Image (spheres, coloured by chain):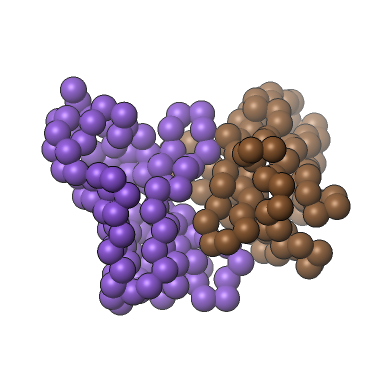
Chain colours: A purple, B brown
């Protein structure tokens, strides 16, 4: 089955620092998405990527669709306390009905 | 409605009992998905509905799990003869494009 490896599993950073996390897949994806999940809530979409090499920003967040189509990264610049949560990558293979999700990166921001 | 609505938000049930979880998707979204999130884990795909097409049930873990979607809108996920390993958060999402909108989930605890 599909393997989606997300790293790191958890991060503890000081407020103001930059953060980077990434995902790699065992197969080629034609869509990569990044979600954030707060406690007791469902994941919320942050950034969607649809083309190899695409680099997209959403405020302090930047994500890239790897040129091999098997990886993606998410950067958060100048972290703030409300960035705390679990970040999930997700990807879709061509012709597939569903998204595959990574196991998540738990981010803690220390004020 | 404005978002994906799930009910109940929490459910505690005795082992061996049946449970029904409800999802009310965003109006106009033709695709509906059920995912399961175990503690500290990523999201595991269960089932996908698209319009009037036959559902993709490839993620259902056993024949104790079933789902239906009536009138192309509300969906019900049923778990029969619940087991302790069924304890998890069950998330529903709907979409019109590649990006999903998730509900807040139903936290199921089997005791």
User: Residue A105, located in which quarter of the rendered image?
Assistant: top left
Vertical position of residue B87 compared to residue A23: above or below:
above
> Closest to the observer: A30 or B11?
A30
Q: Is residue A105 left or right of residue B22?
A: left
Vertical position of residue B34 compared to residue A72: above or below:
above
- Does residue A40 appear anywhere in the picture? yes
- Does residue B83 appear anywhere in the picture? no
* Total marks placed: 0
Q: What residue occupies the far right of the structure in this picture?
A: B71
> Closest to the observer: A60 or A21?
A60
Residue sitting at x 36%, y 34%: A85
User: Residue B49, located in which quarter of the rendered image?
Assistant: bottom right
Vertical position of residue B74 compared to residue A111: above or below:
below
Residue sitting at x 65%, y 25%: B10
Q: Is residue A43 left or right of residue A68?
A: right
Residue sitting at x 49%, y 66%: A92
Location of residue A76 in the rendering, given as x and y in whole percent from the top left corner: 23, 45
Location of residue B97 in the rendering, given as x and y in whole percent from the top left corner: 58, 61
Give the quadrant of the C terminus of chain A.
top left
Q: Is residue B43 left or right of residue B82?
A: left
Location of residue B101 in the rendering, given as x and y in whole percent from the top left corner: 56, 47
User: Residue B78, located in which quarter of the rendered image?
Assistant: top right
> Closest to the observer: B47 or A38?
A38
Q: Is residue A109 left or right of residue B84?
A: left
> Closest to the observer: A5 or A69?
A69
Residue sitting at x 23%, y 39%: A11
Location of residue A14 in the rendering, given as x and y in whole percent from the top left corner: 15, 30
């Amino acid at each position: 089955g599909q393997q989606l490896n997300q790293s790191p599993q958890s991060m503890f950073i000081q407020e103001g620092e930059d953060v980077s996390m990434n995902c790699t897949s065992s197969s080629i994806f034609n869509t990569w998405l990044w979600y954030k999940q707060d406690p007791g809530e469902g994941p919320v979409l942050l950034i969607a990527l649809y083309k190899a090499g695409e680099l997209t920003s959403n405020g302090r967040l930047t994500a890239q669709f790897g040129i091999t189509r098997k990886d993606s990264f998410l950067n958060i610049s100048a972290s703030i306390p409300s960035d705390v949560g679990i970040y999930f990558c997700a990807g879709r293979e061509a012709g597939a009905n569903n998204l595959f999700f990574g196991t998540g990166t738990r981010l803690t921001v220390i004020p | 409605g404005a978002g994906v609505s799930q009910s109940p938000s929490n459910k505690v049930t005795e082992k061996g009992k049946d449970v029904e979880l409800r999802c009310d998707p965003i109006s106009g979204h033709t695709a509906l998905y059920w995912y399961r999130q175990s503690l500290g884990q990523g999201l595991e795909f269960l089932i996908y509905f698209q319009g009037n097409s036959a559902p993709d049930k490839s993620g259902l873990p056993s024949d104790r799990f079933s789902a239906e979607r009536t009138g192309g809108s509300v969906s019900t996920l049923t778990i029969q003869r619940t087991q302790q390993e069924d304890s998890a958060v069950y998330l529903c999402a709907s979409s019109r494009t590649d990006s999903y909108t998730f509900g807040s989930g139903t936290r199921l605890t089997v005791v």
